[in-house]
Structure formats: C-alpha cells, structure tokens
Image (cartoon, rainbow, N blue to C red):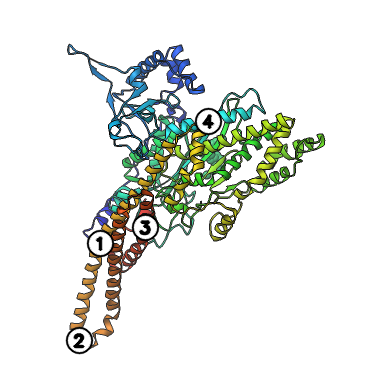
Amino acid sequence: MSTLRFHAIKESLAYRPVKIVEEERRSELFGQNVFNLNAMRQYLTNDAFLGVKNAIQFGKKIDRNIADQVASSMKDWALSKHVTHYTHWFQPLTGATAEKHDAFFETIGDDLSIEKFGGSQLVQQEPDASSFPHGGIRNTFEARGYTAWDPTSPAFIYGTTLCIPTIFVAYTGEALDYKTPLLRALSAVDEAATAVCKYFDKNVKKVTSSLGWEQEYFLIDKMLAASRPDIMLTGRTLLGHSSAKGQQLDDHYFGSIPSRALNFMKDLEKECMLLGIPVKTRHNEVAPNQFEVAPIFEEANLAVDHNSLLMDIMGRVAARHNFKVLLHEKPFAGVNGSGKHNNWSLSTDTGVNLLAPGKTPMSSLQFLTFFINTIKAVHKHEALLRAVIASASNDHRLGANEAPPAIISVFIGEQLKKVLEELEGVTKGKLSPKEKTELKLNVVGKIPDVLLDNTDRNRTSPFAFTGNKFEFRAVGSMANCGNPMTVLNTIVAKQLKDFKKEVDALIDKKDLKKDEAVFNVLREYIKSTKDILFEGNSYGEAWEAEAKKRGLSNSKTTPEALKAQISKESIALFEEMNVMSAIETKARYEIEIESYIMHIQIESRVLADIARNHIVPTAVKYQNVLIENVKGLKDIFEKKYLNVSKEQITLIEEISNHIEGINSNVTKMVDERRSANKLTVMDKRAEAYSQKVMPLFDDIRYHCDKLELLVDDEIWPLTKYRELLFTR
Ligand code: ADP
Ligand code: MG
C-alpha cells in the first residue's frame, strides 16, 4: 500500500470537523468589513456622502475633490480595522478575480513615513496588464490597461487588504473585464425600462436589475483531491469507474448536512456576513458531497461582484476545513453536475417588482408588459443566450443528457399560458369599453389570483418564470454571472426600446389610447413567440426534434454555440445598446474560443499522462502477478494447470486488450492534437478539438475504467469515485 491514494485516505479519515464559534448574531456581523452607506455616513463629510450616494443611485460623476475626501475617509476606516494594503479588485476575462496589493505606507523623506491614500489612487490605477486576456485589443506597444473605481459596489476588507471594486479597460477604452459591459447593459435596461414604466406610472425615475444566484458546488476532502492529478489540474475527474452507490437512492438531496461540511458552511457564511454578502440558504444537492449556497437577491452589479468574491473565498475557507471546493460544472461522470441559477428581475425606484403582478389591473398590465417583452427578447436572441453560457466545462451539462439542455426555451406554467391565450383574442385596433372592462377585470386583473395557485414547477427548463422573477438555469457553476447578466439585460433593453416605439406609433398614428396600444402590441408578441414556450421535459430526443421544427438552435458544443456571439445581429445589438463595440464583441469571442482550446488541450494532456503513466504501468504490474500465478499453477498441476488457471488467463488477456486500447487511443489523440494545433484559424482549431480530440477521451476512459474493475484494489493508484464522493 505505497500509493498516494492510501496515504490520502488515511489522512482524510483522521480529519475532524473544525470547530466554529458562532457568538454574534448575523445581523450584527453583516457588512462589518464593508465601506457601506453606514460606514460612509460615519466617516464622510455630508458633501462627500451625498456625492457618493448620487453616484450609486443615479450614476452621477464624482468630482476630484470628493474623491480625495472619500479616499482619505476610506483609509481612516480601513486603518481602524488594521488594514495595511489596498488593491483595485477587478474581474478580468480569465474568470478569476485579480488584485495587486499596494501598501498605504509611504516614506516622505527625513526618515519620516506615513500611511497615504488619495483620490488619485482610489479613482484610477494602471496595473501592468499585458498578461490578461484581451483578444487582440491591445498591441504590445499599447499594453497598458487601467482600472477605474466603481462607486456602485462598495469597497470591502479582506484579510488586511482594502479591496476597491473597479472596471478594467484598455488604454484605448475597450473593456477587458466582465464588469464594464455589465454596467453599460444595466444602464441600457434602466433607460429602456424606465421609459416603458412611464406608461403606467409617471413617477418612476429608475429601474434596477436584480440578481439572486444559487451557487452549486462539490466539497471533496483536500487530501483525496490532491491525490488526483486530474482534479488538481482540470478541476474534474477525467476517469474513474462509477461508485456502486451513487445518487440512485436520492438520499442526499435536502438531507441532513454532514458535520464537517456544515462547519465549512458556517465558517463561509460568517465570512460572507462580514463582507456584506447576504447568504441565506444552504442545503445538500442531488449528488453525494454536492451542496448549494444562495443569498438574498441584490442589485445585479453588486450581486455579480458578490458571487465572484464568494467563489474566491470559498476556496480559502475550504482549505481551513481540509476540503477542496469543486466549482466545475461536471466534476464526476454519472452524477449530477453543478449549475448557477440566475434569478433575475427588474424593479423600480418606487419599489415595484416589474415581474410580479400588482394589486390593480393597471399594475398587472405593467407586469404583463415586462413579462411578455422578456419572452419576446429570449425568443429573438435564444442563440445568443446559449452562446453566453457556453464553455468547455458547461458543455458537459448542456450538450449531454442532463437538464437543462442546450436548447433555450421558456417555461411559464399552464396558468399564465392560459392568460396569454385569452389575450391573443384581443380585438385589433380600438377596443370597445365592454372588452376593455372585461380584459381588465377578468383577464389581467385575475393574474395575481392565478399566480397564487401556480404551483406547477418545471425543473428542467433552462429559463423559467417562477412567480415573481425569471430563473436562467443554464448558467454554469464556474461562470462569472456578469456575462449572462450583460446579455439578458441587453436583449430585454433592446426589446423594451422596440416595444415603446411600436406602442407610441399606435398612439400617434392610429389614435389609440395607451392601454389599447399596449394590448395591441402584446397580442402580436404573444402570437409570434409561441415557439420559445415549452412546458414539457426539456431534454431528450422528442424535444430536440420538436425544437428543430420550431427553428430553435441546439448547439451542443461551445465552438458551435459561440458563433451566435459574433453574428451580424449580435454585433449590431451590442453596438446599438452601447454595451460593446464591434471590436469588443469580437475580442470576447476570440478569448472564449482560445480558452476553449486551452481547456481541452490541458485535459487531453492530463488524460494521456494518467492513462499511460499511472494506469498502464499498474495494469502491467497486476498482469505480472497473474502471470506468476499461472506459472506457479503450472509447476504444481503440470498438464492439468489449465483447469485451475482459466480465469487468470482470461484476465491476463483482457488486461492486454485494455492496455492496447489505451495505448492506441492515446496515440490517436496525440496525433489529432498535433493536426489541430497546425490549424491557424482559431475557429477551425476549436472545432477540431471538439470533434476530433474530445471524442477520444471517452475511448481512453472506457479502457481505464474497465481496468479499475479488474486490477487489485490494493495497487490501484487513483482515488476511486466511492472514496471521493462518500468521505465526509
Ligand atoms: P425557490 O425558487 O427555491 O422557491 P425563492 O423563490 O425564494 O426560492 O428564490 C430563489 C432565489 O431567487 C433566491 O436567491 C432569491 O434571492 C432570488 N430572488 C427572489 N426574488 C427575486 C427577484 N425579484 N429578483 C432576483 N432574484 C430574486
Ligand atoms: Mg432555483
């Protein structure tokens, strides 16, 4: 028992839950390490406080004098909490968060030194950014990028560092991060939605997009994870036979949380409280050792920052509890993958959730307006929505036989479907007073009641209406939510803008009343968007065939799906809504294609290494034991030895076949990789990786997993699925 595997198992069995003290109430901890309005109120002058507040609420610019004051107060606040460094904290397109720490400490001559932090350090920094992905935007001679303060997301303290959320852009102004386009999309949806709200309530001045994410993850013992090179290098298992017990018994979902995991969660939640991340829900997920954490929803930009921050601190807290967090969408074959449901809605500064029906018929008509426009936007841009959640790792959920599928559809439930059917019959043009009353009282007015008993839930839909919000479920667990939130808010903004034009035209040219015009436009939308609505089980062949008839896209791989990101329509859409220039859109596409290629390339190398250098030698070793055994039997039984060594001889042959299977397929895979690397057009290279290299993973894995069943457990080098998934 000399393998790392057994050492790891022994260590992991000795781990006990790490004690967690929970003395203070959560409400007392909440936001303690955040320079939030409460802290600002105490540290800022009234002028500075109002300046920041206006920037947060209405996007007003903060002038230099105020920035100096804010910086100085931020420093005082941070020093009072024993902070020594500050950093601009941003989200480059690598998917991770980035930071470079600078000390407040400065020397000022004459052997004197002070802690210094001024407006200029707060507002803008120039990190040497040449090694962040940029998709060709920055030539080497213009490799500078800069980070700029985002006052809408409050600064926070992590460890002994003051972190200032920032955007990250090229010197020429193009976005190099997730936040910049998101902020532009949020502003676009604010403008378009506020204009539409004015049909219903003149007092609305601002519409905010909200996001409540639900983060799924696996928690694996740290030592066991460390014993698997595939987990360490790719975040998932590339091979491993399924465990005799998996998730068949459904005994993990919502079950009692194992105490080691529970203590990790408590610790994580405490960190979240201090950082102002309002986590509220924790539970076991479907697969063994799979869990979920979800906060109370927040303004979308803040929620995205909080999710990025959470993913980062999860890893650090896990280490304290001897765990490794796997955020990969599909760490284990044969058990459920992980996603990150994005619950999304829009709400007004007057406190109205635009995706919740109101008490009066007029507010319910407002709800219908936003509800139907969202459906229309998703229908029109379904391929783009699919593209924005595409990644090498998410392909394992979306393209494979697992909900949600690669086809985007919208689930609204039978009750709301009936409401839409009734609205479809609304008269063209002017409505009679009787029809109007009938509609307001008995169709639109009844929506709140209808929704009360709208209990049908569809768990397989990638985009579902869940009572007062839409839930975009196809987002991957590793993804930065900034991307899907940018696209969703942009397409809805564009749709609302078009809607307003159509309604205004009917009012001006056909002399319709406001509500008549709204009904007329919505009626046409209902008719034209039926193909995106789907109430059934969203995966499987029947739906695929049906979706094809409806003209919905069904891109199973990332290279295929990403094409929609740079279609003429998408480029025009982002330009029109001032979210991304054509250069920015194309750069993002290139970055994603390259990232896809690199992921598959790394996986392919790791797989080849494990198969050839770990599995084959182990199989040979065991085969030699069998050969010795047969030889011995031959010595004892002489001619009759075949009677007693039949099984061993069959095993020896089987092992040889699998070794051959591994070696020939690894050779094939390496050859395919070489050919792929010769392709200079990146799209073609990505396609080759997806169509030629990837399929060989399965063949290699097949033989390795068969060997796992044949070879003596005592010498098997890789920690097995049952050990990874059931050690708590
Ligand atoms: P479930 O869908 O599991 O029944 P909830 O309805 O409470 O649970 O919501 C799940 C998630 O949706 C939570 O993260 C919650 O914060 C979020 N959520 C609720 N309302 C909204 C909203 N108006 N906008 C965005 N997210 C929301
Ligand atoms: Mg959910």
Foreground of the two, 467 or 665: 665
- Foreground: disc 4 or disc 1: 4
Question: How far apart in space, not on screen, are marks 4 and 3 (Cα)?
Answer: 40 Å
Foreground of the two, 392 or 680: 680
Numbered disc 4: secondary structure:
helix
Residue 661 location, quadrant:
bottom left
Residue 520 location, quadrant:
top right
Left or right placement of residue 541 versus residue 326 in this view: right
- Foreground: disc 3 or disc 1: 3
Tell which circle, 2 or 4, labels the residue nearer the N-terminal end. 4
Residue 580 location, quadrant:
top left
Q: Amino acid at mark 3?
A: Met
- Foreground: disc 1 or disc 2: 1
Q: Amino acid at mark 2?
A: Glu
Q: Is residue 195 above or below residue 344?
A: above
Question: How far apart in space, not on screen, are marks 4 and 1 (Cα)?
Answer: 53 Å
Residue that mark 4 sits on: 188
Tell which circle, 1 or 2, labels the residue nearer the N-terminal end. 1
Mark 1 Cα-neighbour bin, 10 Å: few <14, some 14–19, many ≥20: some
Q: Residue furthest bottom?
A: 639
Residue that mark 1 sits on: 612
Answer whether residue 230 is visible to the viewer in this image. no
Question: How far apart in space, not on screen, are marks 2 and 4 (Cα)?
Answer: 86 Å
Q: Is residue 336 above or below residue 420?
A: below
Question: How far apart in space, not on screen, are marks 1 and 2 (Cα)?
Answer: 36 Å
Disc 4 within 8 angstroms of ligand 1 (CB): no
The quadrant of the rendering that contains the N terminus is bottom left
Asked whether disc 4 touches disc 3, contact meaning CB atoms under 8 Å apart, the reply is no
Answer whether residue 587 is visible to the viewer in this image. yes
